[in-house]
Amino acid sequence: MEGGGILAGLATNPEAYLLFSLLLFSFGIIATLARKNAIGIFMGVELMLNAAALNFVTFQVLRRGVVANETWLHGHIFSLFVIILAAIEAAVALAIVLRTFGSRQSIDPDRATELRG
Amino acid sequence: MSLAEFLSGLNHMLGTGLPMVIFSVLSAVIIILLFAMPVGGIATYVERKIAADFQERIGPNRVGPLGLLQFLADGVKMFLKEDTISKNADRFIYNFAPSLVMAGSLGAFAAIPFSAYVIGADLNIGIFYAMALGSFVSLGVLLGAWSSDNKWSLLGGMRGAAQIVSYEIPLGLTVLSVVTISGTMSMHELVSQQAWPSVHGGGHFWNIVHNPFMFINFFIYFIAALAECNRTPFDLPEAESELVSGFNTEFSGMRFGLYALAEFADVILFACIASAIFLGGWQLPFFDLRNLDIGLTVGDVSLNPLIQTVAMMGVFLAKVAVLIFVVMWLRWTLPRLRVDQLMNLCWKYLIPISFFNLIGAAIWTWVFKGQGMLELLGKMMGVL
Amino acid sequence: MALVDLFVALCFLLGIGGAFFTAFHPNIMYAAISLIMTLVAIAGLYGALGADFLAAAQLIIYVGGILIVILFAVMMSHDIYKDRFMAGAKKYILPASASFVIFAGLAALVGKMDWAGNTVPDFEPTARAMGWALVGPYAVPFQYVVIVLLLGLVGAVVIARPSIKHEDDEGNQ
């Protein structure tokens, strides 16, 4: 257990965090573009938001000596705002979803085409 | 101690080798189980006895003296029952949901200050952490209800989730006002501040009498906590007369046992938090238990810390027991609310009042520099 | 190898697995549960980075609030968790390739960066400092967020409220 090992220093390696959040972001894009379901799309958006928020904290904590001198909380605050806005986004989005479902028994966004000219 | 500090402290454990790690994890699990299982079981027994008293029955009296071993018999019965899963149930979630509920309510106990020296982890965001873990309970209720493929379960689960999400707001606001007047989220500090006001400074006595707003807040907290634990008069998620048994209709054997146990653990948890943040935790009026000195020694070692710990835990658990008794008392006294009454109570009364109280408590703290009513009174009369 | 590294690795695995199933699982219910896994993993990463307040906030807001609302919506719109709502496999080709291009580009960028001068997390409590920041330098953005929250809340209620009665201009039914 002592010494190197493949995982050594993982917790303080910004590249690992960035690649992780990048993966999350990619899966979020896939979910947003490919799902034929409003809630699925919404979950993809949540994934992307979280990936971005994690990046803010990563840069703040692991790179504060380089990119942000003596300002050790900006990333945290930004992530907090992301979380708060995600909450209100969830409320509004799901209200719309429920309303859409109530009026046309489907939440497939491709079928909401009444306004198409 | 911050959450991350706690994690990095775990590093040292790995230095002692894998067997030590496994040993510590196992012992933590066993201690929690040793705490939760009997306490949950005894709570069941007490509840049945109290229910019997209210209804002028005798209650459990067959197993053991006074029926005291009834909870063991119940436990054995639950373990031995056939574990049925309905055909169309979603197996994975069905198996997974009860443990989620259990994990949520047991994990929060880590931040409970049983005495000045007995606390699982004195996190700097202790109260916030306890509330965060509590959110797993509603998740487990909702998932378990959905997965059991039963209309009654689903209705119960939906009611449960709506209720828990709504009542989390007044609950959070009352806790927030406690944090406002105390200036800390660490459970240990929250309790330490509630000492009897003394000449040596410090201490504003129990938060419930800190100011008039906190007095109202305690009752709001209590009502909201009742709703969070799905207890009567807010037990709509498992309303027997309409929904069979609500979200746990399809669960049998130990899975049902986990839900029942988690409900009791939840009640105990909220009673613990209420006692810690409003009723002074292990603090007594007039006397600081940290100064308790009976002069007993074994060799050169003073027994004081041990005695103090026992006394503090006794005081703390006595307060918790009183709160739990009130919860059970209410259960056999009040009828169940309707769903619309439940939501009205939360959104039209509790939330506005708790908002008002939060602002009031903040203004009080600002005007009187964080002093409590008793402190001010003492200074006015020249006692302090 | 420190335990924190192991913990972080576990969070990475949990998060990536959760994100994968969120994107690809045909059953929307399981996708939602995978999303919970990812969000809990991110809360764990916040903890490992020393952002204790954020970790708890992530749990309480996402798991206790947003995920409950999502599951609620999944259950209210009955039958949507049935498989027929799954997009066909070929619907995934274009989004997957697009996201792979983005992933490859950004990953190359991450690889090209100069990562000298990294700092380690300092495990100071952040809650108090964040509170001061929110009423100090961030007071205006914070109030802005508060107003957005309020408007969003009212908007959600207005949208979701059933409008059974339609009154015309004269006030007749």
Image: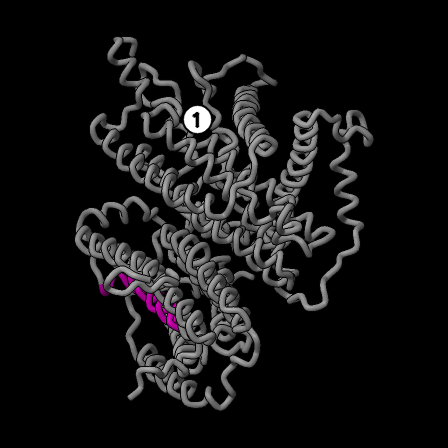
Where C18 falls versus B212 (above or below)? below
Which is more toward the observer, A116 or B26? Answer: A116
Q: Which residue is mark 1?
A: B280
Q: Chain of mark 1?
A: B
Relative horizontal placement of residue B252, taking residue B268 as reference (left or right): right
Question: What residue is drawn where x is 66% and y is 60%?
Answer: B95
Residue C158 x/y as whole percent: 32, 60
Residue that sits furthest to the top in the current view: B382
Residue B23 x/y as whole percent: 64, 48
Report the span colored magenta.
Answer: A44-67
Where C38 falls versus B67 (above or below)? below
Q: Circle 1 — which element?
A: loop
Name which quarter of the figure residue A64 lies in: bottom left
Where C170 falls versus B253 (above or below)? below
The disc labelled 1 sits on which kind of residue?
Gly
Relative horizontal placement of residue B89, taking residue B124 as reference (left or right): right
Majority secondary structure of the magenta segment?
helix
